[in-house]
Amino acid sequence: MTIERDGSPLLAFARRGPDGGAWWLTHPFEDEADGSAANALVGRIVGLRAETILDDADRGATVGSSAVTITLTGATPAGPAGAEPRPGSNEAPLVLRVGLPVADTPLRFADISDRPPVFELDATALMDELERPAESWRSMLALDVTTWDADQIVMRRGERSITVERVDGEFEVEKKWRLIDPESASFDPAGFDAAIGSLARLDAVRVAHGATAAETGLDDPLASLIVRYPDRPEARLDIGRAAGDGEVYARRAGRPVTLAIAAADAARIDPSVLRQDVPPASATDAPGEGSP
């Protein structure tokens, strides 16, 4: 989906990943998008309805220099094999042009690539939505994972770590997780289940624009949480140094930005909480410090 305003690129989104994937912003910057906001925007666009059809309207005078042009690719399923691509199919994009205001009304002139006449529609809410700053379309989730379909979960802080395996066919809390490394450690399955549930969807406080690798410490992370799957890439969140009062730097694998998350959230990525044979780590432990 691409959106232009007054002839210049405004926003562009694309889906990436398996099963339709997550929404990503590709313009004006590259990063994972707020999926709920992107879905709501698509819903608002496809939910627009013509108020009046104008069969004899001058297309050039009403929408020829459109205020907003929206291009949707793969908006509807493709037609039969060998058929001409339909606008909005997987082969041909659907293009909506929202043009000049209709005098003395809240409506605007518009046209769409698979309908020849010009029509009038109420695009007020859409136009207001497009006034949002680009940053507001960025995902502020530091981590967003599922655990029910995971193969393994690794939690590490400094030199302490645990690797836990999901037991197929087991759904009772005490039975569905099995500690596989270290084998000799005392393990709390219920505590692990609660900890992973609380970390599966983790908010960022802000994007740490301009933070360098030397500042963040993410080249040698203090802690990491890794969720491995049988049929898709692993999800990984690394924790670095303090980023300010009550914050630490964090980086999620696959995202091009450094985030700041609450130090209290980062402190929960601590295997010693789930291993009863070692004392808990401090949220500010440097990599390598603390009990093995």
Image: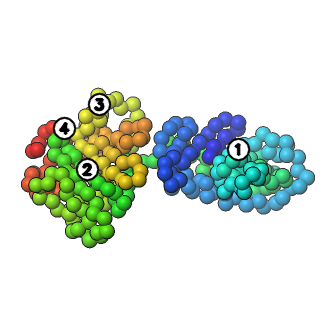
Q: CA distance from mark 3 to mark 2?
A: 25 Å
Q: Give the amino acid type for the residue marked by disc 4 in the picture.
A: Pro
Which residue type carries mark 2? Val
Q: Residues within 10 Å of mark 1 (few under 14, many from 20)?
A: many
To which residue does mark 2 refer? 154
Q: Residues within 10 Å of mark 2 (few under 14, many from 20)?
A: some
Q: Which residue is mark 3?
A: 215
In the image, 185 versus 58, the foreground residue is: 185
Q: Which residue is mark 4?
A: 287
First in sequence: mark 4 or mark 2?
Answer: 2
Residue corresponding to mark 1: 69
Residue 184 can be seen in this image: yes
Mark whose residue sits in front, 4 or 2: 2
Secondary structure type for disc 2: strand
- The disc, 4 or 1, on the residue closer to the chain's N-terminal end is 1
Q: Are marks 4 and 2 in contact (CB under 8 Å)?
A: no
| Residue sitting at the far bottom | 172
Nearer the observer, disc 4 or disc 1?
Answer: 4
